[in-house]
Image (spheres, rainbow, N blue to C red):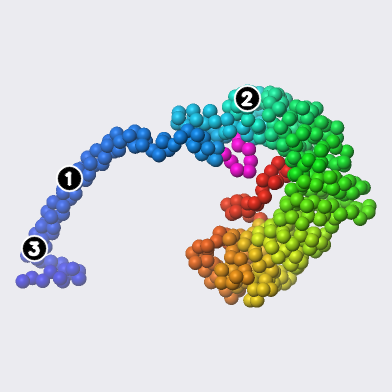
Amino acid sequence: MISLEDFFTTNRAPNDEEHKILKHLAAEYDDRLTTITNKISDLEAQLQILNDEKTLIMEAAAPFKRALLPFRRLPEDVVREIFVACLPIGRDPTMSATEAPVLLTRISSATRRVALTTPALWAAIHIRIEILPERMDDATSIMAARAVGVEEWLLRRSGSLPLHISVHHPRAPYKDHDLGQKIIDILLGCCSRWRCVSFMSLPKFLLRISTLTHADVPILNSLSICPSRSDRDDVDWKSSLILTAPNLQRLSVSGMPRPSDYLANWSNLTHIGFPRTFHFSLPGFIEDLARILRQTTRLISCCIRILGNIGLLNPVDEISLPFLKVLDVIEDGILPAINAPALETIRYNAYDDIDAAPMNLIALLKRTPNVKELWMGDFTNPHFLVECLRHCPSLTRLRVSGLIGSDDNDKQNFIRNDALIEAFVLDDDTQCLCPRLEYFHCDKYFPLSLGTLHKFITHKNGRSQALSRWDTVVIKVVYHPRDEHLQYIGELSSKYVVEDMKLSLLFEKWARSYNSFGMRKPEAPEDVWWQRRSQVDFEHLMY
């Protein structure tokens, strides 16, 4: 019998007889392959027929299944509550078709009917009066259509509910145009229903608002006024009676030259804000502010962002704020006088460099041991941060803008930051800095050894009752290419490490020409993790 194996493993050519045998065997395989191929074609045809039938059945059954959806069986009042829960959190909804409430009118005729007859969906609105330069030719028609939408929104759909309104106007180059006049007329027409309102950079509108009296806004609870810096002298708020609204509890006004000149009922306020206030060497401003704060005995939150060097004429006497829980401050000249035993949240120079130990803040922290949340700016030396944190035994949430380092010696920057981070996870748990800390967030990249980072994340894993477990850690690390623990980069992103915590780690390799210390990356998803428990206390107070 002829062996055919040689033809499979060598290049030997078959003779005529061998060629005939090989051809016959190949033909047999071709016949079998043809048979299988034909069967596959038949089965594929049958499968296509079945798939087509399946599609028809699914389409026929779809209406029946839609009719059986649990959502359709919900009582209408429950659906309304669900729709209201879809509204944006922390801000007023816009007129965009991509978010509630407008989006809810685009789902079906049924949801549209429910949405349009739910006043609570339409009791708040954010309006931006702005036309792009390239569309100025169509500006009149655009703003007219927008005004129609605002009128329908506020005057018809919202029923008689109290209104939450925020309006932003571009500061330049079209600040003097009257394109938004119709919208302004609509807003003023429903001022008796204003509950919480915020107006930014509206020179002509602000002038009209300043003429309102307390009788015009009987239920006004929150008022925020933020004119552009160039327009602050155009409106005299000192004698505006709207500041005496009987139910006004939240007030924020930018650019107050002297708070005591205003007619506000300071003793009624629970939340006040002085954001974007510019006072360069204005004598007596801090003393005047102190006199106002002494009247706000019910104060819960306070925002004081004063830009400029202000010298104290005399030491400020104690300011007792027994209910103050939230303090946002840039100017610290008034801090030594504040006595706030209930203070829980401090935001200090959150976007500025801190190039010296903040002694006034430290003095405040010594008197308020119950601070649980702290947000501070860029520290040029981490030792300054440590000096603050030594007086925060109850701190659970810490956010710093950066640990940028001011030393030209790169090794020294690594050493300093290592010392800071290690202080949170010392081997002796009883000596750790801020033992209750659960949240750590640094916005910008900073140099850190990978071994220190590994210990920082893994040490607080619940093994010690003296230390709270990590809930959230957000760190952007610059590591040295010769770091002896490079393997930790992969290990720290393992499931074992992150299963019980929210962890965001970004790494960049250090280089001699590295120049991005302190550079913050674009807005990241983890920014939403920084949700203050007292965030509501800041609404409409800060810009």
The residue indicated by pointer 2 is 155
Q: Residue at x 84, y 45 (%)?
A: 295
Q: Work out which quarter of the rendered image holds the C terminus and state it.
A: top right
Q: Is residue 270 above or below residue 368?
A: above
Question: In the image, residue 510 lies at what x, y percent?
Answer: 64, 67
Q: Which numbered disc flags the more N-terminal residue, 1 or 3? A: 3
Pointers 1 and 3 in contact (C-beta within 8 Å): no
Q: Residue at x 71, y 28 (%)?
A: 191
The residue indicated by pointer 3 is 21
Measure the alpha-carbon separation of dots 3 and 2.
94 Å
Q: Quadrant of residue 236?
A: top right
| Observer-nearest of 406 and 183 | 183
Question: In the image, residue 383 lies at what x, y percent?
Answer: 75, 68
SS state under label 1: helix
Q: Which numbered disc flags the more N-terminal residue, 1 or 2? A: 1
Q: Is residue 58 visible?
A: yes
In screen coordinates, is 220 left or right of 36? right
Q: Is residue 56 above or below residue 501?
A: above
Is 309 included in the stretch rendered in magenta? no
Q: Is residue 150 visible?
A: no
Q: Residue at x 69, y 69 (%)?
A: 433
- Three-letter code for the amino acid on which mark 1 is drawn: Asp
Q: Which residues are magenta?
A: 87-94
In screen coordinates, is 153 left or right of 192? left
- Three-letter code for the amino acid on which mark 2 is drawn: Leu
SS state under label 2: helix
The residue indicated by pointer 1 is 42
SS state under label 3: helix
> Badge 2: how crowded within 10 Å, few (<14), some, or many (20+)?
some
Q: Residue at x 60, y 27 (%)?
A: 159
